[in-house]
Image: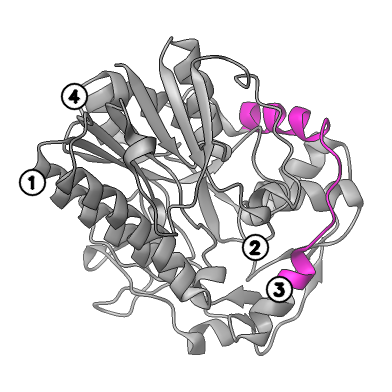
Amino acid sequence: MNKVLITGGLGFIGSHVAQACVERGFSVRLLDNLSPQIHGPVPRLNYSFLGDPRAEIVRGDIGSPCDWQPWLEDVDCVVHLAAETGTAQSMYEIYRYTNVNLSGTASLLNYLANRPHKVTRFILGSSRAVYGEGAYLCDSCGVVYPGTRTEENLRAGRWDPRCPKCGGAAEPVATPENSKTSPASIYAATKVGQEDLVGIAGNALGIATVIFRFQNVYGEGQSLKNPYTGILSIFSNQLRQGTYINIFEDGRESRDFVHVSDVTRAIVLAMTSTRADGLTLNVGSGTPTSVADLVLLLGEKLGVKAQSTISGQYRVGDIRHCFADIRAIQETLQFIPEVSLEQGLDRFLRWVKTQPIEADRLDAAHRELASRGILGEHAAKTASVR
């Protein structure tokens, strides 16, 4: 492998992949627009690979008309991570999200289809959001796939999806890759579109593709500035400030948290092996954790009492539960997550303590969502304080 282009290369996951590549002797070109929402108005770039002759940094925006030729020169592997990622924000920033995530990806693939290049491998960072609610088990109907939760049910505090066939109770189960996609947000819809574009174009162009559906990725280097995504970063910043944490719904909504080092390892395996070529694979821990439990665990590890309010608020486009079935990636790439949530939080919080406490922009973000009808409130809520 001669050179790797990482789009979003100075972002959270991209910077970890870049470091892993440099450590393995690969040359990398890191393309990033240094978005102020992620990096702040004055980016602080303190990556250890800066100054290494094998790491080249270029500033560019895939959402703007661009010439890919200088960015793809001598590149034989593309790791495509550049994307807008805020689920709720995507519901009103529709053009921006489709322009960056879909048009930007189409622009890259269009170059590969029409110009000489050396790219033989293409790895896409997709998202568990493509599943919507994912897989559930109904005692009467078996495995089912509930649709998007309605505003009526959310306002009434009916948080958990019901079986779409019989209307009975259903429990979330690990979601495999062959589950149907059911995006509940504009962001999720753009990720489904990205997957289709990359899979179809790669097959037509003879470029080996691997599509990874990341679960909730967290870890050292995650943006502490972005109020629209990354609940671990948001909550840890609030805990350090001693402010109340607003837990949506009833706090029992759950996510699959996977440490960035495990995600990086999966990407490197796909870069250096042909075993996953042509496949779409989940990357996660395979274990769900509720948001309320996460807040308590963060407080314990930071040594502060977690002051939280279970508010009954909700965001349109949010899912209730989703966690990954990771058997396929275990079988193809022999990938097993190495970092438990306990270990990962210890590592993450050690890093957080070295960072300045950022201004809490969450209230402003919530006001923006509320003004646009994205943030709602359970009609009969009785907020509880923990």
* Residue at the spot of label 3: 366
How many labels, in total?
Answer: 4
- Which of marks 1 and 3 precedes in the sequence? 1
Separation of disc 4 and disc 2 at Cα? Answer: 39 Å
Q: What's under tag 4, amino acid-wise?
A: Arg
Residue 261 location (% of width, % of height)? 52, 26
Separation of disc 3 and disc 2 at Cα? Answer: 17 Å
Q: What stretch is highlighted in magenta?
A: 342-365
Q: Is the magenta stretch mostly helix, strand or loop?
A: helix
Q: What's under tag 3, amino acid-wise?
A: His
Q: Residue 251 carries which label?
A: 2
Residue 88 location (% of width, % of height)? 55, 70
* Residue at the spot of label 4: 275
Are the residues tagged 3 and 2 within 8 Å (C-beta)?
Answer: no
Left or right: 363 with respect to 72? right
Q: Residues within 10 Å of mark 3 (few under 14, many from 20)?
A: some
Residue 318 location (% of width, % of height)? 51, 68
* Residue at the spot of label 1: 204
Q: Nearer the viewer, residue 131 or 271?
A: 271
Residue 8 sits above or below residue 336 on the image: below
